[in-house]
Image: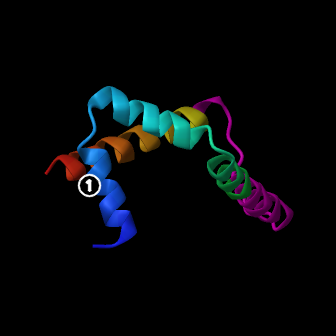
Amino acid sequence: MTALEKAKAATAALADDEQYELFRWWVESDSFRQRQLAALKQDIAVGIDQLDNGSYQTYNEATVMQLAEEVGRAGRERLKKLGS
């Protein structure tokens, strides 16, 4: 059993409130925050590159509503697949 598997098993054995405290401790840790910040910086860099290359879509009031409907539909389909 790997260390990760042991940690997962130990976490599963904790009470709900203890799991919550463990999660909160991890989310507040510097390591977690550094990873989140690095991922955010990467996402921003990708977005800036896309803008620089003209890879974006502009929306008006009508098309933004269509986008919202498409996103909602895709989300519902994804949830349905996960539930199956």
Q: Say which quarter of the image contains residue 59.
A: top right
Instruction: Describe residue 46's horizontal placement relative to residue 63 as left or right.
Output: right
Q: At 29% from the left edge and 30% from the top edge, which residue is drawn? A: 16
| Residue 43 falls within the magenta-colored stretch | yes
The 10 Å Cα crowd at callout 1, few under 14, some 14 to 19, many 20 or more, is few
Q: At 82% from the left edge and 68% from the top edge, which residue is drawn? A: 53
Q: Is residue 67 above or below residue 2?
A: above
Residue under pointer 1: 9
Q: Is residue 78 visible?
A: no
Q: Say which quarter of the image contains residue 38.
A: bottom right
Closer to the camera in the image, 81 or 34: 34
The x and y percentages for residue 32 are: 62, 49
Q: Is residue 63 above or below residue 47?
A: above
Circle 1: residue type: Ala
Q: Say which quarter of the image contains residue 41.
A: bottom right
Marks counted in the figure total: 1
**View extreme (left): residue:** 84
Q: Secondary structure at mark 1?
A: helix
Closer to the camera in the image, 4 or 43: 4
Q: At 38% from the left edge and 65% from the top edge, which residue is drawn? A: 4
The span picked out in magenta is 40-62
Q: Is residue 20 above or below residue 76?
A: above
Closer to the camera in the image, 12 or 83: 12
Instruction: Describe residue 43's horizontal placement relative to residue 32 as left or right.
Output: right
**View extreme (right): residue:** 52
